Amino acid sequence: MQIEPNYTETYLLPPSIEDWIPEEHPARFIREFVDTIDLKEYGFTERKSEEGRPNYSNKLLLKIWLYSYYEKIYSSRQIERACRNQLPLIWLTTMHYPDHNTLWRFFKKNKGRIKKIFKHTVKIAVLNDMVGFVLQAVDGTKIKADVSKDKVLYGPDLTKLLHIIDKSLEKANKQIEEQEEKGKEIISDKLPKKLSNKKKLQSLIKKGVEELRKEEKHQLKKDLEEGIKTLEKVGRVKLNITDKDSRLIKTKGGKDFYYNVQSVVDSKSQIIVGAKATNIETDNHLLTKMIEEAKTNSGRLAKETLGDAGYFSGEEILKAQENGYSVLVNEPPKLSKKQVGFRKEDFHYNKEKDSYQCPANNELKYSRKHKRKSKNYYIKVYQCKDYKSCQFRVLCSSNKNGRRIERYEFEEALEKQREKQKEKENKELLKKRALIVESVFGWIKHNGNFTRWYYRGLESVEGQWLLLCISVNLRKLYSAWVKNGLTYV
């Protein structure tokens, strides 16, 4: 005897929706979590109209988005299908089925407010003693933009082709004058804009533009000038016209258009306490910003913040020390470059005299101060005066004016950081950095199969990144909810 489905069976009493999923199901937790939030207080607004079909409530739509990301469903079309096919979502929506346009409009309208929901997860974690404030780690990861590499404005190519066009138009004008004198008719066609297609652009440069008609050349010239103006406006050499906020970044996988997203993770339960999306290519100047982001969300400052070599910036380490932020940041490995003679490290700085002492006991006194282009800090220069009589003259410097040493404003801060890292306890702390924060990126990118953004523009990407970070925090909160329940106020 086998059990077969009976499609004609009817129920004497209608089944209760509450019986459709187990008591400890994540969908129940997410329903409870959203129901504790005052969305009006967080700025979520609803359509107010007595005409037409009633709108879906913000709480219903937020529950759908949060549970979908919890279950690694990311696009609005996929979420729409899941609302009809997955029992937990059918239960969560009580058999309401918003379409992908409704879901997308909710995200588009409220993407700036998702940050408050993320902050709310941090607040609940703090209330339930899941954030230790002892040790946290900051790191960034690159995720590909939703663009094609073919849709790129490339400055040098545009400039080169503009030069070719100008020359060609001069030649064409002379030919036109000759043709007009002979009474010949000039035929023109409209040229489609193809400047963002790299292959076609380079083909025009290679083959030339003589086959184009006069009006085609004028249109191309206009497009080129607009493209160059756009690049100048944003201060870039390459710009993807599909998503102008994305940036061309070199990673281990090669060059492509990415966003650089940041997270600060507390070590106690691996709650993400700070999250931000940027289009800044490197992490150099993001250390203090991310510490402040975490402090704003959690309400307190962690005793120690760990960072990898990408955050090792003298300016940032000095700023952290001035603000009272205790940091441990790995120093990038020095290049294996053979150096003959004395290195800067061989010279001892005397703070009281504001001078350097060389290995031969000669003094390099303060000479002048200058500021390099594109830098916000001053550099002090120390000059040797005894180089003519020094027996180590050849070993020390080939400069005819003797050895010079430059000292940056943040040099002392770097020296303190290096000394701090020599302590055994701090060496052990630095070893924990990758385990604390990099595993979180692994959950999102590898376990969650999230390797490319679904939306374009920095604001939309940040909204999506915050949803991903919320989903990580909700998993941690769910585990605590199942075990002991949660305090919400």
Image (tube, grey):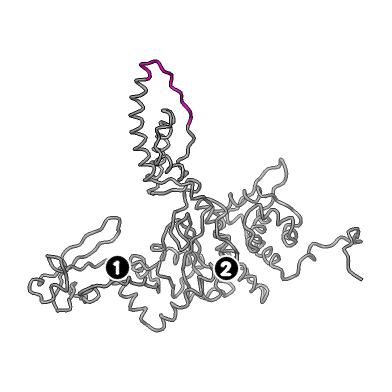
Q: Which residues are magenta?
A: 179-190
Q: Residue at x 45, y 41 (%)?
A: 195
In the image, residue 455 above or below residue 285: above
Q: Residue at x 37, y 82 (%)?
A: 423
Quarter placement of the N terminus: bottom right
Quarter placement of the C terminus: bottom right
Q: Residue 403: give x, y in percent of width and height.
A: 16, 69
Q: Earlier in the sequence, mark 1 or mark 2?
A: 1
Q: 195 or 431: nearer the eye? A: 195
Residue 128 is left or right of residue 155, and the answer is right
Q: Residue 168: give x, y in percent of width and height.
A: 35, 32
Residue highlighted by disc 2: 443
Q: Residue 20: give x, y in percent of width and height.
A: 79, 64
Marking on residue 259 = none
Label 1, residues with CA under 10 Å away: few <14, some 14-19, many ≥20? some
Quarter-wise, where is residue 408 in the image? bottom left
Say what secondary structure mark 2 lies in. helix
Seen from this angle, which residue lies furthest left? 389
Q: Residue at x 25, y 62 (%)?
A: 378
The three-letter code of the residue at mark 1 reads Phe
Q: 237 or 114: nearer the eye? A: 237
Label 2, residues with CA under 10 Å away: few <14, some 14-19, many ≥20? few
Residue 456 visible in image = yes
Q: Is residue 188 magenta?
A: yes
Quarter-wise, where is residue 417 in the image? bottom left
Q: 336 or 146: nearer the eye? A: 336
Q: Residue 471: give x, y in percent of width and height.
A: 60, 64
